[in-house]
Amino acid sequence: MPPQPGIAERAIDTAADVSRTITDVTTALRSAVERLSDAIAAARRPGQPLSTISAITREAPLASLFVAFLFGVAVARRR
């Protein structure tokens, strides 16, 4: 029967596993943030939806706030 690993070896193995997991999660999160940033940048180009919404909001902030409030009420009532 081979000898069982000691508590120190198990702790080192666990720490290595946790480190790999954190690295994997960090890499995935960084990739997701890059994709989201690219999508937002594309949507802010002139003529795109975020550009249009930004322009409308700058021109009529109170009307935009009122429309957003009504949209929120409509969504809340559907649930």
Image (cartoon, grey):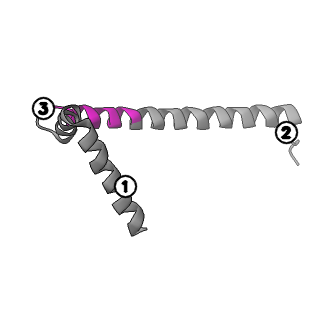
For the residues labelled 1 and 3, say whether their Cβ atoms are less than 8 Å apart.
Answer: no
> Is 42 in the magenta?
yes
Q: Secondary structure at mark 1?
A: helix
Q: Nearer the viewer, mark 3 or mark 2?
A: 3
Magenta: predominant secondary structure element?
helix
Examine the rendered structure and indicate whether residue 70 appears above or below residue 58.
below
Checking the image for residue 5, the label placed there is 2
Q: Which residue is mark 1?
A: 72
Q: For this view, does 40 lie left or right of residue 23?
A: left
> Is 58 in the magenta?
no
Counting residues from the start of the chain, the first of labels 3 and 2 encountered is 2
Real-space CA distance between mark 3 and mark 2, rounded to the nearest whole angstrom: 63 Å
Dot 1 crowding, Cα within 10 Å, few <14, some 14–19, many 20+: few
Magenta residues, as a range? 33-45
Counting residues from the start of the chain, the first of labels 2 and 1 encountered is 2
Q: Which residue is mark 3?
A: 46
Q: For this view, does 60 lie left or right of residue 9?
A: left
Q: For this view, does 39 lie left or right of residue 59?
A: right
The one of 26 and 63 positioned closer to us in this rendering: 63
The one of 9 and 66 positioned closer to us in this rendering: 66
Q: Position of residue 55 (x, y in %)?
A: 18, 33
Real-space CA distance between mark 2 and mark 1, rounded to the nearest whole angstrom: 58 Å
Q: Position of residue 61 (x, y in %)?
A: 26, 36
Q: Position of residue 68 (x, y in %)?
A: 31, 48
